[in-house]
Image (spheres, rainbow, N blue to C red):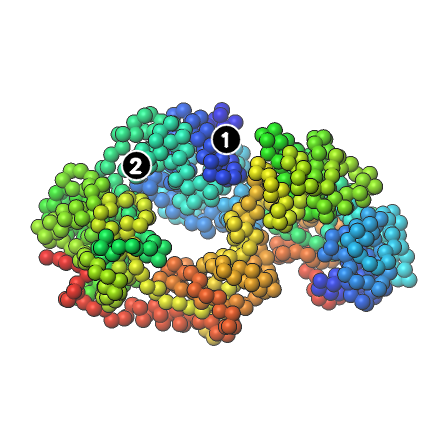
Amino acid sequence: MEIIKAGSDGIYLPQLNIGLDYSGSDAEYVFVSHGHSDHIPRRSTANTYATRPTKKFMKLRNYRGQIEELNFGNSLETDTARITFYPAGHILGSAMTFIESDFGNLLYTGDYRSPASPASEGFQLPKEAVDYFITEATFSLPIYRWKSYTHLEKQICSFASNALNEGYTPIFLAYNLGKAQEIMHFLKNLNHPVQIHNAGFKLCDVYEQEGIDLGQYETYDHDTCKGKILITPGSALGNGFASNIKKKRIAYCSGWAAMEARRVQMTVDKLIPLSDHLDFFELIRLCEKLNPKKTYITHTPNPNVVLHYLEKRGIAASTLKQRQKTA
Amino acid sequence: MNEQHPHTFHALARTAQQIRESRGTNAKIRVCMEYLRSIKEDEHLNLAVQFLGEGAFSDISGKRASVGSRTTSTLAADFCEIDYELVFKPCRTATGSSSETIEKLFTNIPAARQKWEPVGLSLKEIETVYEQLYNTSSRAGKQEVLEEYWRKMRPLEVKYFIRIMGRGSLRIGFETKSIINAISKAFGKDTEAVRYAHMITGSIGKTAVLAKNNTLDEASFKLFHPLPFMLASPIESRAVDQYSKYIAEEKFDGMRCQVHIEGDRVELYSRDLNDITHSFPEIIEFFAEKDLPKLVLDGEICVFKDNTILPFQLLQKRLGIKKPSRKILDQYPVLLITYDLLYHDGEPIFDKTLLERRKLLSGLSRKYTFPITTQKEIKNREHIQELFDLALAHGNEGLMLKSKTSAYEYGQRRKSWLKVKKAGGSLDTIIMYAHAASGKRGGKYSDFTLGISVRDDERYEEEFIPIGKAYGGYTELERLNKKIKELTVERYGPTLGLIPGIVVELEFDDIQRNKRTKANYTLRLPRFKAIRWDLSPDDIDTLKEVERMFRDNINRDRLDQTQAPSFIWK
């Protein structure tokens, strides 16, 4: 199968006329893996498909084109392929795209997380054999191994309640779509009011419509935020967010928080390695389980270690080249 | 947990990590203070504080575990059953720390997890491990010791075990000043008294024990226990108001040294308080023969030949050699040039003024004929320039201005001593890597690895090789960071690999040989002079240029000591 990595324009499969998170003008069909802006097509004249939550996020984020809903469990048949979304566990609505065709079966992960985020539809693999596996590898080194969600939930809740008990306002630094709501979902049992940055607030409705409990929350308000649990992207802190509060404690929630260097870079009180990508060990395990004919690594700061591990396990793998023809 | 087993190494590691994770000096001091109070036995308190503040060995012991980063890293890779080059190194690049990498891999990798089983080693046991490492010379031998004990530790313990062993900073944002604060708070003592005891004993661990037992006043200066050196600030950073307050002497291109003398027992200590007696037998002999009273002298060791002071690079040939051969002694003869007196007539005199100390030193120098610096009154600003030029002509680094009324402020770098130096040179270099900044510049890149060109150098395959690390560009941080973004091709956690594109004019004090680097040279005190937006990678300096500068400096003409000498002898 021919696979074209079109740089920041996503991936294009010319024989099937399919684009994956694709912004170029060649594809007839485009499948959007999830609602993060680096995966949403910037423009598209193609028939564009996304899950219901992803479609809503795209609309809320001002995507102007037409979007067709393709939900988990349903397939789309084109002249040359059958396309099915599988839950990717990354954020609500996130989907892996599974393509069956005469050229072989291909699974494109988009961003994914296994075990799945509790604030998502879960994680599920297709039962059929996968010939070509295009996987992201954001955390592509064995220094990354995530703690269980039970553990992380406890860490998040005790950070918030300890701060509150000691008279501090807890602030979680988390990006607006996905991480913010995941944290709110964890915090719901504290029954303490949460204020979330306005840009993230707008996206919370979609979560509730899909039945994910986000607890008691409102949009951030400078005058009343003291003593609430606050959630904001890190960038807002420099722009006056909660600047009126002297006694605050800040937690940075990200996979990158696994590294100590982040503490000084971010100037925060607590690093919570809460990631919405799968860790290194899970990635290797998954490749072993799928045992595809060929694995392609993309979206990674350093593919070499993953490639070395896969090679040792006899799994054919390479990085996704500009223009890739599978053997 | 800490409360139950405060004497374990794990309690120390947890405390260090807790200090690391606390924000603000006061919060950190509080964590440390509570830990210190929880330790019952003196012996354990001594070790705990020494490990936190000094390292595996007390500064004055002169001992080192001498375990390099490669020794620990390759062993750790074997321990995890991973490839050192292909797996360990990329991980270290991402974290920026080998000890942190080891902690993570020991936690994450199943093969490693199976090997370790914590037994709760005590501080005392860890001390014996460091002793074993000190007494083992081969890398294989050291690795055997390390592996035996790593199997008994948690990954957190291993991380701090390595950091303490390295004598470097524990990287928990907690330096000596804070530890002194924690000791004084823990035992309700005056901070100044604790600091004084530390300076005198040279041991932060002993100081803690003295504080705990209400015996800080027992701390007194002893011969053959080196005192931390008084240091100088660059003159740029401290405005001089009245020149008449200072005297000037030449700043030698040598090695700082403290000499302790009692009869024919003579010992030499370096800036980092290591015993360097055996490297310089001619200095020992020189002073031992003179039948001097008990003395502590401060001065500089220089290579001195044909009545001329020779460059530091030649002195380097003498460093680290414990028993120099006849040939080396003849080729690189050294001299100790004194400029201060700290102990005289059976008592420390560092509280006396420089003028008083100097008077005593001059008397001794005349009576026993040993070298002493020439000191000059400063007439005006122009006079400084004149003296400075003379110093450079002598082959020296520049000038020292010393406040006449100042005490010997051991271990301090204040305004009483000022150094006037000239930059050794500058090179146009290329930014190869950018490292994320910390603190108030967090999130921006302001630390850089800089390279020189070896494009047409048949000895290298690369186009550029690193020559040094420096930080800077603060005034143009936005522009610089925008450009960095455009040039980034690789990302290793906090470090970015860049396409050559940004030229930095780098200033430095000196060039030194260093066989452990790719270039075989390192720069002393490299710093940004300017970002040269006007230059391209084709314009940057080559390794050959560095080699030329190094040779030129060694071979440059030096005024001998016949006229207007830098020091007097006889």
Residue B562 is labelled as none
Give the position of the C terminus of chain A as an image quadrant: bottom right
In front: A131, or B487?
B487
Left or right for B48, reference B330: right
Report x, y in % for residue A292.
75, 54
Badges 2 and 1, same chain: yes
Q: Determine whether, in the image, residue B520 is placed left or right of residue A73.
A: left
Name the amino acid type tagged 2: Tyr
Pinpoint the chain carrying mark 1: B
Mark number displayed over residue B196 = 2
User: Above or below — where is A241 with respect to A295?
Assistant: above
Tell me the mark number nearer the camera, choosing from 2 and 1. Answer: 2
Q: Of the residues under marks 2 and 1, which one precedes in the sequence?
A: 1
Q: Going 51% across and 48% down the picture, which residue do you hit? A: B439
- Please report contact status of discs 2 and 1: CB closer than 8 Å, yes or no: no
Read off the residue under disc 1.
B119
Which residue: 22% across, 37% down? Answer: B222
- Residue at 68% x, 56% y: name it: A299
Question: Which of B455 and B246 lies nearest the eye of the viewer?
Answer: B246
